[in-house]
Structure formats: structure tokens, C-alpha cells
């Protein structure tokens, strides 16, 4: 008796099945060398950030003492899962190297070929040989101060500008103390005592946070900027009616003559424009304070000259000048937390996308900050500044 099967031969044969292929997560190998740049105390990742990265299976090597300037100990990093290295070479020879200041040419020699470098660029302090050395090692380099997000803002630059703006007023308050040989005025508003007067040049992020802090302390604030749009936005953001004006020599001279503190926060294309001339500064009050946050671009006070954290002030025409270019490093822990909070999501996202190469295809913000891709210069500004050939990053990534 024959038996009949309800299934055909084809149906009984093994059939192919399409399964969803999961995106393979990339494992990151991150190195944090100790900063060697003069008076740079910040660190790119806090112990909490390291703990988040190691919890996702990533490896972090940190040079011993790298977090000391920001008051983080080796023990804190070790407990977070990082390997503490006593050899600077080990931190530089990771696949991804994180630094605040750009590496020196000697440090570039320690970086492995084809590695990824993430640091600031500080274009005006670099030389042509620096970029030639990166090219020779076929390094992929990202400048975190060039990273622009989907809202068309520079997140790390904005965050550090907020710190610099707030700090500029706090620094002025310190310098006015008699303990610092100031004029003994309190930067605030005490009953029965006329409030101090603060003049701010620039209505950008630094100027806004300087104004916010000065108003919070009870000072009278005047802000000068040649952009009416910025001045309007400032008034809106502060939600407080304050004196604003375009930059007019007579108005500037009169405001400086009456103020107790003047803060420079004006940027320029190549250098900051001079807003306050030397004759204007000569007419300022004895013991008045100038904090020139724009000094990294030449300064907007004619009498400004570069100073350091260890020797931050000088006096000219009876006015105390503070012209340190790297103010956020003075508050290294706050600045480190700020930088770390921005870096960590980027790093985790790179891993989620399956590695750096895949992340570049989808993460436009990373491409915005990139200035070298496997040794090929991709930043037009750098290329034109140093007369180097460059290519569009979007044509290199397929």
C-alpha cells in the first residue's frame, strides 16, 4: 500500500532564511596622555566617563598623573576600569588618542601610524611641519574646537566660552580685593553703596555669561558690540533690560572712564579688533581692572600683552591688566567635566556604529571637526593658511 506525503519534495528540502544582521559594535582602545603644554591642567575624560566606557567593554589607558591638575587621582581612574600607565608611550600608542592641547611634534612620533587623534587644533600656534608629520603617519585627526553639531553650534567651544565668561567676572572680583593690591571694591550691590560698573566688549557667549554673572552680583552692566542681532539676542537671553550699544569711540571712552571693570570678549577673523585705545585706558580709574579674554587673538585693548596663570597680571596707567589666554584651565575640574560630557556620547556612538569609519559615514558632526583623514588634509582653512594641498572629506568617504 503506497503512502502519500502531503508535502512536495521541494518543501521538504532545507530552505534558506534571511536573518537580520546585527551591526557589529566596535571596541575602542583609548589613550589619555598627561598634558605637557604649559599650565594646561584639564583632562578629556573624567573617572565617571571612563567608567561608562569600560562598562561598554572599551579599554582606556591613562598616563599616571594625567588627572591631577583637575583633582582626579590615579586611584579614581583605576577603580573606574582604566589601566594606569607609567610609560607615556603606552598612552600614545592606543588606537584613539585624546588630548586637550594638540600634541607636540615629539609626541606625534609616539603615535602609531593610522591612529585617530582627537584634540584642539590651536591653528595660530602651529607650524607647517606639524601637519606634514601628521600626514607622514597617515593619522586621522579631529579638532574638537571645530566640531559643529546639528544646531550649527560648536558645543565644546561654547561650553568653554561659558566658563571663560563667568570666570572673567570672578577673576575681576578677586583682583579688586586689597589682598591682591586692588582698590578694595566689592563687585556687587550693597545697600547704601553705589554698585560697581562693568563694561563688556562683545555680545557673544563669553560676553553673555560675563554679563549674566555681573548682573547676578548686582553690578551695572554695559555691553558693546557692532552686531545689533547679537545685542538683541543678549537682552532676550538675559531677560533683563541692560545698556547695550554699538561700538562708538565717544561712548566707549565715556563708559571706560566711569567703569570699575572692563572685559574684552570680541573675536575677529585673524585677530581681535582694538576697541579700547591707549588714551582711553589712560583715562580709566586708578585701580580699575581689565580682563582681556580675547588675548588669544591679540586682545581688544591696545595695552594688552600676553600673561600666564603663574604671572597673570601687570599694571599700566594705573589699570590692572589680566591677559591669560587659557582661562578655563584655571578651573580645570569644571572644564574637564564639561569636555568629558561632550566627548563621552561621541565615543559611545562611534562604538555603536561599528567603529570610527562607519561612524564617519553617518555622523556629520565628526566630519565637521576632521582636518586629517588617513594622512590626507581635509580642512580648507589649514590648507590655505600653510599652503598645503587639501581635499573635501565628503569625497573621500564612500
Image: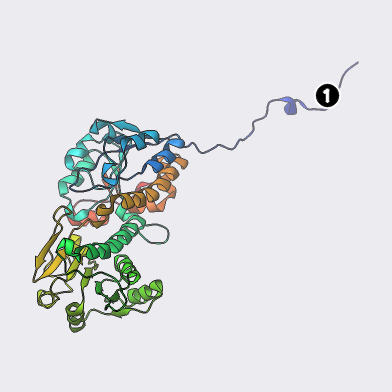
Judging depth in this view, the residue of 284 and 102 nearest the camera is 284
Q: Is residue 31 left or right of residue 357?
A: left
| Vertical comparison of 216 with 384: above or below | below
Q: Give the quarter of the image for residue 31.
A: top left
The residue that mark 1 highlights is 5
Total marks in image? 1
132 sits to left or right of 222: left
Q: Is residue 396 visible?
A: yes
Q: Is residue 216 above or below residue 137?
A: below
Quarter of the image for the N terminus: give it. Answer: top right
Mark 1 Cα-neighbour bin, 10 Å: few <14, some 14–19, many ≥20: few
Q: Residue at x 39, y 40 (%)?
A: 50
* Residue 154 sits in quarter: bottom left
Residue at the extreme right: 1
Specify the farthest residue to the bottom: 250
- Say which element carries label 1: loop
Examine the rendered structure and indicate whether residue 79 appears above or below residue 147.
Answer: above
Way the structure is coloured:
rainbow
Residue 397 place in picture, x, y as percent: 38, 46
- The answer to whether residue 384 is above or below residue 2 is below
The answer, for residue 298, to whether it is visible in the render is no
Q: Position of residue 354 (x, y in %)?
A: 45, 39
Residue shown at 36% from the left, 37% from the top: 76
The x, y position of residue 171, in whole percent, is 23, 62
Q: Residue at x 18, y 54 (%)?
A: 309
Residue at the extreme top of the image, as rendered: 1
Amino acid at each position: 500500500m503506497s503512502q502519500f506525503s502531503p508535502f512536495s519534495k521541494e518543501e521538504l528540502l532545507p530552505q534558506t532564511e534571511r536573518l537580520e544582521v546585527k551591526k557589529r559594535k566596535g571596541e575602542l582602545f583609548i589613550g589619555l596622555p598627561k598634558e605637557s603644554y604649559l599650565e594646561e591642567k584639564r583632562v578629556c575624560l573624567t573617572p565617571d566617563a571612563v567608567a561608562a566606557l569600560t562598562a561598554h567593554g572599551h579599554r582606556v589607558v591613562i598616563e599616571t598623573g594625567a588627572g591631577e591638575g583637575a583633582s582626579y587621582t590615579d586611584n579614581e581612574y583605576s577603580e573606574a576600569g582604566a589601566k594606569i600607565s607609567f610609560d607615556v608611550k603606552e598612552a600614545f600608542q592606543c588606537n584613539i588618542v585624546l588630548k586637550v592641547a594638540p600634541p607636540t611634534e615629539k609626541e606625534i612620533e609616539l603615535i602609531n601610524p593610522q591612529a585617530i587623534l582627537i584634540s584642539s587644533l590651536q591653528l595660530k600656534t602651529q607650524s607647517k611641519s606639524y601637519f606634514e608629520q601628521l600626514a607622514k603617519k597617515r593619522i586621522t585627526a579631529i579638532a574638537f574646537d571645530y566640531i559643529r553639531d546639528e544646531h550649527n553650534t560648536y558645543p565644546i567651544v561654547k561650553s568653554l566660552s561659558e566658563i571663560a565668561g563667568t570666570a572673567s567676572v570672578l577673576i575681576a572680583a578677586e583682583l579688586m580685593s586689597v589682598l591682591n593690591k586692588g582698590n578694595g571694591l566689592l563687585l556687587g550691590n550693597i545697600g547704601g553703596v553705589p554698585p560697581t560698573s562693568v563694561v563688556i566688549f562683545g555680545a557673544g557667549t563669553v560676553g553673555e555669561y560675563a554679563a549674566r554673572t555681573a548682573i547676578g552680583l548686582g553690578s551695572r552692566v554695559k555691553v558693546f558690540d557692532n552686531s545689533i542681532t547679537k545685542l538683541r539676542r543678549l537682552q532676550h537671553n538675559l531677560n533683563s533690560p541692560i545698556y547695550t550699544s554699538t561700538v562708538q569711540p565717544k561712548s566707549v571712552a565715556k563708559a571706560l572712564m566711569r567703569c570699575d571693570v572692563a572685559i574684552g570678549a570680541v573675536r575677529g577673523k585673524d585677530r581681535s579688533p582694538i576697541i579700547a585705545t591707549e588714551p582711553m585706558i589712560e583715562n580709566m580709574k586708578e585701580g580699575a581692572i581689565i580682563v582681556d579674554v580675547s588675548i588669544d587673538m591679540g586682545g581688544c585693548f591696545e595695552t594688552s600683552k600676553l600673561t600666564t596663570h603663574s604671572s597673570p597680571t601687570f599694571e599700566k596707567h594705573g589699570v590692572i591688566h589680566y591677559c591669560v589666554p587659557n582661562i578655563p584651565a584655571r578651573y580645570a575640574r569644571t572644564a574637564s567635566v564639561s569636555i568629558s560630557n561632550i566627548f563621552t556620547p561621541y565615543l559611545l556612538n562611534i562604538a555603536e556604529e561599528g567603529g570610527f569609519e562607519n561612524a564617519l559615514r553617518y555622523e556629520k558632526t565628526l566630519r565637521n571637526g576632521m582636518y586629517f583623514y588617513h594622512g590626507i588634509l581635509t580642512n580648507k582653512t589649514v590648507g590655505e593658511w600653510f599652503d598645503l594641498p587639501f581635499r573635501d572629506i565628503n569625497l573621500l568617504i564612500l
